[in-house]
Image: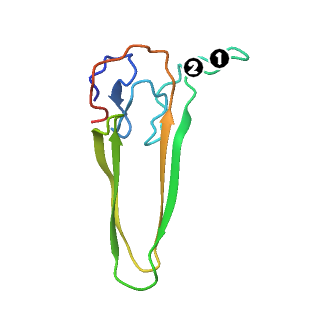
Amino acid sequence: MSRARPGTAGATRTCPHCKTTILQSASRCPSCRHYLRFDTPSPAPGEEPAHTTTNALQVEGTIRHPAEGGAWEYSVVLVVRDGDGKEVNRQVVGVGAMFPGDERSFSLAVEITPTSDQRRPGRRRLGH
């Protein structure tokens, strides 16, 4: 969990469904996709929704194992770094094996949700 106080940008909590660490402001878990809150007010006509989530980064790729040769093992490692290049978080998000003729597709999305919080807390570790 983050050290940010509840209600501040970057504050986290645990999803009650899948136990993943998520943003406290999330109304839907990005991992299990269950809805968590239904109290988000509708915007006035012509007004932007308060929590418009956009994909700031989307990367997709496919790996195909050739029809010959031994199995390939893989580890999907996600690393987050700050502006100075310092590692903030590292997680193995999946492992497995591919056998001749197998194919795997991978997708990474970074979702951004603007907030009105202008406070800048001290340096902290995000995620777990």
Tag 1–tag 2 contact (CB < 8 Å): yes
Q: Quadrant of the C terminus?
A: top left
Q: What distance separates the C-alpha of mark 1 from that of mark 2?
A: 7 Å
- Hey, which residue is sitting farthest right in the picture? 45
Q: Position of residue 122 (x, y in %)?
A: 28, 19
Inspect the image, locate mark 2, and give the three-letter code of the amino acid beneath it.
Ala
Inspect the image, locate mark 1, and give the three-letter code of the amino acid beneath it.
Pro
Quarter assignment of residue 71? bottom left
Q: Residue at x 34, y 27 (%)?
A: 12
Q: Residue at x 27, y 24 (%)?
A: 123
The correct choice, above or below, for 114 with respect to 92 in the image is above
The correct choice, above or below, for 103 with respect to 93 in the image is below
**36 horizontally vs 73: left or right:** right
**121 horizontally vs 50: left or right:** left
Q: Position of residue 93 (x, y in %)?
A: 34, 51
**Mark 1 or 2 closer to N-term?**
1
Pointer 1 residue: 43
Q: Quadrant of the N terminus?
A: top left
Mark 2, Cα crowd under 10 Å, few <14 / some 14-19 / many 20+, is some
Q: Nearer the viewer, residue 72 or 20?
A: 72
Q: SS of the residue at dot 1?
A: loop
Q: Position of residue 7 (x, y in %)?
A: 39, 16
Q: Nearer the viewer, residue 82 or 34?
A: 82
Q: Residue at x 42, y 80 (%)?
A: 100
Pointer 2 residue: 50
The correct choice, above or below, for 37 with respect to 87 in the image is above
Q: Nearer the viewer, residue 102 or 124?
A: 124
Q: SS of the residue at dot 2?
A: loop
